[in-house]
Amino acid sequence: MVTLGCARNEVDSEELAARLEAGGWTLADGQEPDVVLVNTCGFIQAAKQESIDELLGAAAGGAKVAAAGCLAERYGAELAEALPEAQVLSFDDYGDIAARLDAIVAGQSWQAHQPRDRRRLLPLAPSGRPGAAAGQLPGHGAVATPRGGPAAAGWRSAEAAPPGGGIADLPPGVAPASGPMVARRRLGDGVVAPLKIASGCDRRCSFCAIPAFRGAFVSRSPQDLIAEAGWLAARGARELLLVSENSTSYGKDLGDIRLLETLLPGLAAVPGIARVRVSYLQPAELRPGLIEVMASAPGVAPYFDLSFQHASGTVLRAMRRFGDRQRFAALIGRIRRLAPEAGIRSNFIVGFPGETEADVEELQRFLAEARLDAIGIFGYSDEDGTEAAALGGQLPAEEIARRVDDLADLADELMGQRAAERSGEIVDVLVEEALGDGRYCGRAGHQAPEVDGTIQIRSQTPIAIGEMVRATVTGSIGVDLLGEAIDPAGSAPGRRAGTR
C-alpha cells in the first residue's frame, strides 16, 4: 500500500488496511506483492502527477495495480482510459475492497465509475446528513465480522481495545454492545496519529475542487472519536492530530456548532494522550469560544492552522473567501492576547487570476506584520471544474513562478525570525527520536508534524520516546529550535506554553 497526500489520506489507508485484513489479505512487508494499492492525491497538479508517476512505477515492477483515493475518485473512467495499467476504484468500493482486490488478482476487470458531484449524495441541509452517509465516506463506515470469524486485529469499536490487537473476540456476526465496529489498522508506530473528525466541505471556494469529489460536510460522532482516541492511545499514540477538510464546521450537522469546544478537552482527557492538535481551521468560522479553548485547555496545543489563502480583500472575494489584511491581523491579535506563545501557520496562493502587484504587496505587508510560525506559498494552477479556471486575468506561468519565488524567500526569512524570537521560552516537547549523546528530537506545541519545524534538546537524563518534556529554547537554525531539557526535580517552575 502506498499513501500519497495529506493526513486524511493516511487515515483512509488505515481503514483500507483493516478492511483488507478482514478479507484475508496481508500487507506485504519485504516481499513481492500481488497487488499494489495506491491511495492517490488529486488536490493540485503536482500532486496529481506524483500519483500518476507512482501508479506507473508500481506497474513497471510487475505487480497488478489499483488506484484509490482522490485522484481515482475525481477522474474515474477518464483515469482508467488514460492509465490502463491500473484498475481505478471509487470511494464506494472501499466497503468491499477485499473483493475488489480478489477480482484484480483473478484477472477480472470492471467498468470504472463515472465521476459525480458527491455533494449531491447527501441532503442539502446539514441536519439531515447524520446516518445518511456512513457507506459513502471513507473513515465513517461500519463493517461486518471479518472473514474467518472473530473481530480482526486492527478494528476498533466504542470499547477500549487491548494493546496487542483488536477488540475482544466476539462470536461471528455479533457486534459489540456499543454499536458497529469501524475498521482501522495503524500502519506506523509513531507517537503521533491523525484522527479524522469529519469529511467533506460545504464551502464554495472558487479555486477548489475538493468538495465535488469528497462530498458535503459530515461530522463523526464524539463517542466514536473518543473511542478511537483510546484505541490509538493503546497502540502508542501520544499526540492526536485532528484532521478534516474544515475542522471549524465540526458539529454543525449534529446540531451543535460549538461541539469542538467540548470535544477537545474530552480527547485530551483520554488516558495516554498527552496532546491534541487541531488542523484545517477556517478564519471565517473561528469563534471566540473555540479560540479560548485552543489557547488554554490543558492538553490542547495552542496551535492555529488558519486557511488565509491571501491577504488582499480583492483577491479573497474573487476566491469566494472571507477577510482581508486588517481582519486577519485582528484575528491573530485576539489569539496572541490569549496565548502569546501560540503557533500560527497558514498557506497562501500566489498568482490567482486578476492578482495585481498591489495585491502581492498587500500580502507581503501582511506576512511581515503577522509573524507566522509557518508559511506555505503555492502557485495558482487551474483545477478542472472550478469557477476560477474560467476567470479572466489569468497570469503567465512564468510570472506566477516569479511571485512564488519572491514570496517564498520572504517567508523563509520571516519564519527564521519568528523562530529566533522564541529563544528563552519554556516549551513542552513531545520527544519522537533519540539522536544519541543526550540529544533528542521532538516538537513543541507550536510545531505540527511534518509541515512545521522541530526542536532538538539536550538532556542530562535519559528520555523515553513519547515522553512530554519541558525545555528551555536556547536558539534556532532556520525554523528549527534548539533547547535544554529542564530537570523537573531541580528547576524552578517555568512558563508553560499555553498557560498564563
Image (cartoon, rainbow, N blue to C red):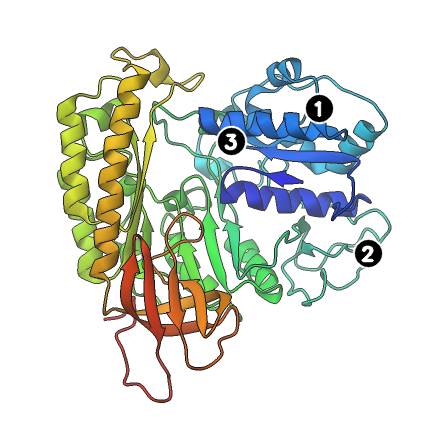
Q: Is residue 12 left or right of residue 94?
A: left
Q: Any mark on residue 314, and which?
A: none
Residue 226 in sight:
yes
Residue hosting label 1: 87
Q: Are marks 1 and 2 in contact (CB under 8 Å)?
A: no
Q: Position of residue 1 (x, y in %)?
A: 67, 40
How far across and how far down the image is residue 394, in percent? 28, 13
Q: Which mark is residue 150?
A: 2
Question: What secondary structure is found at the residue carrying circle 1?
Answer: strand
172 vs 310, left or right, is right
Q: Which residue is mark 3?
A: 214
Quadrant position of residue 406 = top left
Amino acid at the residue labelled 3: Arg
| Label 1 – label 2 distance at C-alpha | 31 Å
Q: Earlier in the sequence, mark 1 or mark 2?
A: 1
- Going from the N terminus, do you reach mark 2 or mark 3 first? 2
Q: Are marks 2 and 3 in contact (CB under 8 Å)?
A: no
Of marks 1 and 2, the one in the foreground:
1
Residue 231, image x, y percentages: 61, 61
